Image (cartoon, rainbow, N blue to C red):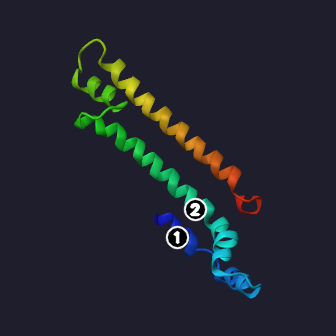
Amino acid sequence: MRNTVVGLREVPPHIVESALGMGMGRGRIMITTQLPLAWPVIVTGIRVSAQLTIGIAAIAAYVAGPGLGGYIFKGLSSVGSKNAINYAVTGTLGTVLLALAVDGVFILIARYTTSRGLRG
């Protein structure tokens, strides 16, 4: 939510003023001008939120929640046993790979939905 507000506030005022001067209404300015210019910032906020959610979901296993964090905590709680490292590594790599996959999806979404002129 914060990145959406920041992205919309960072749209240069002269661009909005130009759109008003061309006769666009507030709704049309928002959809055709402000949102496309703020989109990269908005998608970045969604990416960060998704990464935080994956990290929190791994920690949720500490309170008996399901997920890959269960393997991490099972490995940590059985340190010294034969499979302790296997459990911890499996949970950690699974969480990292999931986070990388989700991040890659958001990078592709940002790349294919952002105007070429804004990509740099």
When asked about the image quadrant of residue 66, the answer is top left
Residue 52, placed above or below residue 64: below
Q: Secondary structure at mark 1?
A: helix
Q: Which residue is drawn at the image coordinates 31% and 29% (left, top)?
A: 70
Name the residue type under label 1.
Val
Side of 29 where 90 appears, left or right? left
Q: Which residue is drawn at the image coordinates 63% and 73% (left, top)?
A: 30
Residue at the top extreme, as displayed? 82
Residue 4 drawn at (x, y percent) = 52, 66
- Badge 1: how crowded within 10 Å, few (<14), some, or many (20+)? some
Which residue in the protein does label 2 denote?
41
Q: Which residue is drawn at the image coordinates 53% and 41% (left, top)?
A: 102
Side of 106 where 25 appears, left or right? right
Q: Secondary structure at mark 2?
A: helix
* Depth check, front residue: 18 or 95: 18
* Depth check, front residue: 12 or 85: 12
The alpha-carbon separation of the residues under discs 2 and 1 comes to: 8 Å
Residue 117, placed above or below residue 99: below
Name the residue type under label 2.
Val
Asked if marks 2 and 1 touch (Cβ < 8 Å), the reply is yes
Residue 101 drawn at (x, y percent) = 55, 37
- Of label 2 and label 1, which has the lower sequence position? 1
Quadrant of the image for the C terminus? bottom right
Residue at the bottom extreme, as displayed? 21
Side of 91 where 4 appears, left or right? right
When asked about the image quadrant of residue 62, the answer is top left
Residue 89, placed above or below residue 10: above
Which residue in the protein does label 1 denote?
6
Residue 10 drawn at (x, y percent) = 58, 74
